[in-house]
Amino acid sequence: MKKILMIGFLALLITSCVSYRTLDLSQLTTGMTNADVISRIGRPQRILAVNDTRDGFQEILEYRTARDEIYALEFWNDNLTGYEFL
């Protein structure tokens, strides 16, 4: 019985250590701040663009799914305006 419990515990420990990033864009709504987005879906893979224009400050962030799909999230003045599949 102890062996079965030990095997079960080790299997649980190993599977909990595996990092599998899922990207659930349904959690996002326009108007969310950059900090809100990071708290919901995590940090971006990289920053694609930063522009300081007369219309405001634009930032485009790249997010990747576990299947290597790439999405660009666009922020204007720290508010999410939308996202696009690349």
Image: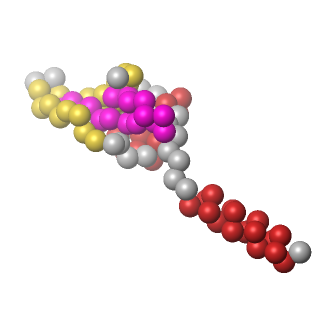
9 and 28: which is toward the camera: 9
Residue projecting furthest to the right: 1
* Colour approach in the figure: secondary structure
Q: Is residue 70 left or right of residue 46?
A: right
Secondary structure predominantly adopted by residues drawn in magenta: strand
Q: Is residue 42 left or right of residue 3?
A: left
In the picture, which quadrant includes the C terminus?
top left
Measured as percent of width and height from the top left, residue 22 is found at 52, 40
Measured as percent of width and height from the top left, residue 70 is found at 38, 30
Measured as percent of width and height from the top left, residue 74 is found at 31, 28
Magenta stretch: residue 61 in it?
yes
Magenta stretch: residue 64 in it?
yes
**What residue is drawn where x is 69% and y is 68%?**
10
17 and 81: which is toward the camera: 17
Residue projecting furthest to the bottom: 2
Residue 31 visible from this viewpoint: no
Q: Is residue 38 above or below residue 26?
A: below
62 and 6: which is toward the camera: 6
The number of numbered discs placed on residues in the rendered structure image is: 0
Q: Is residue 10 above or below residue 78?
A: below
In the picture, which quadrant includes the N terminus?
bottom right
50 and 76: which is toward the camera: 50
**What residue is drawn where x is 62% and y is 63%?**
14
**What residue is drawn where x is 42% and y is 40%?**
37
**Range shown magenta:** 57-72
Residue 10 visible from this viewpoint: yes
Measured as percent of width and height from the top left, residue 36 is found at 42, 42
Residue 33 position by quadrant: top left
**What residue is drawn where x is 39% and y is 22%?**
85
